[in-house]
Image (cartoon, rainbow, N blue to C red):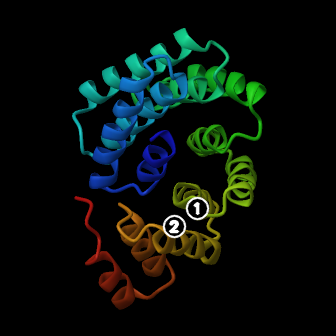
Amino acid sequence: LFLQGRQLFRQKTPEGYTQAIALYQQALAIDPGYAAAWSGLSGVYIGQITEGLRPVAEGCRLSREAADKALALSPDLASAHAQLGWIAMSCDYDLAAAAQHMTRALMLAPEDTDVLHNATILAWSLGRLDTAIAIGEAEVARDPVNGLAYDSLGDSYCGAHRWDACLASYRTALALNPGYLGSHSGIGYVLLVKGKPEAALTELQQETAE
């Protein structure tokens, strides 16, 4: 149930988020002490508010509660520390606190792809694009079927104006998860930058995220 929930979360679709929550909750009904499931649930709530699928205040509260439960059960759970870093970024707008949480997570599990994913977002938010790209490339090398990883790496490539690499990453994310929110708009943006407005419009018209 946990693995299915994580995979559905990574699809980055409204249905995937809803189904992921249900699966994590089923796992927790079987084992309320399953810290990793609490951490996974925290990530889904943040994902929902990022995509405008849940009110921000509600999503932040639910995400924080789930991450706190995960850490109460397992104080050295790297993914939960990484989730607190994401909460600090998305809810508190406190990049310094996010960096502290993420540093702790990376010390505990430097090869965990969920931790690497959140670290990529933090590095991008801090404008450290070379670091974001390096972490993102390490993430996709370790988990080459993770659409979230390719999407974040694409963001970093775009920030560095590496348009061809950005386009390839976004298209890989979309190929792995055809309903992926934001991929068509990302691809359309890159095509527009590359001087292909008609192709950009065609791509943007396929976007489902409001």
Is 58 in front, or is 122? 58
Q: Visible in this render: residue 95? A: no
Q: Residues within 10 Å of mark 1 (few under 14, many from 20)?
A: many
Is 194 in front, or is 3? 3
Is 187 in front, or is 53? 53
- 203 over 102 or under it: above or below: below
- 14 over 127 or under it: above or below: below
Q: Which residue is drawn at 34% across and 90% down?
A: 198
- 104 over 182 or under it: above or below: above
Q: Where is residue 202 in the image (x, y as percent from the top left)?
A: 31, 85
Mark with earlier residue (1, 2): 1
* Relative side of 4 to 206, left or right: right
Q: Which residue is drawn at 41% across and 21% down?
A: 66
Secondary structure, mark 1, is helix
Secondary structure, mark 2, is helix
Kindly identify the amino acid type of the residue bearing the numbered disc 1. Answer: Tyr
Q: Residue at x 48, y 39 (%)?
A: 2
Residue that mark 1 sits on? 150
Q: Visible in this render: residue 46? A: yes
Q: Position of residue 19 (x, y in %)?
A: 31, 47
Residue 128: image quadrant is top right
Q: Where is residue 29 in the image (x, y as percent from the top left)?
A: 36, 24
Q: Are marks 1 and 2 in contact (CB under 8 Å)?
A: yes
Toward the top, the furthest residue is 72
Q: How crowded is mark 2: few (under 14 residues within 10 Å), some or many (20 or more)?
A: many
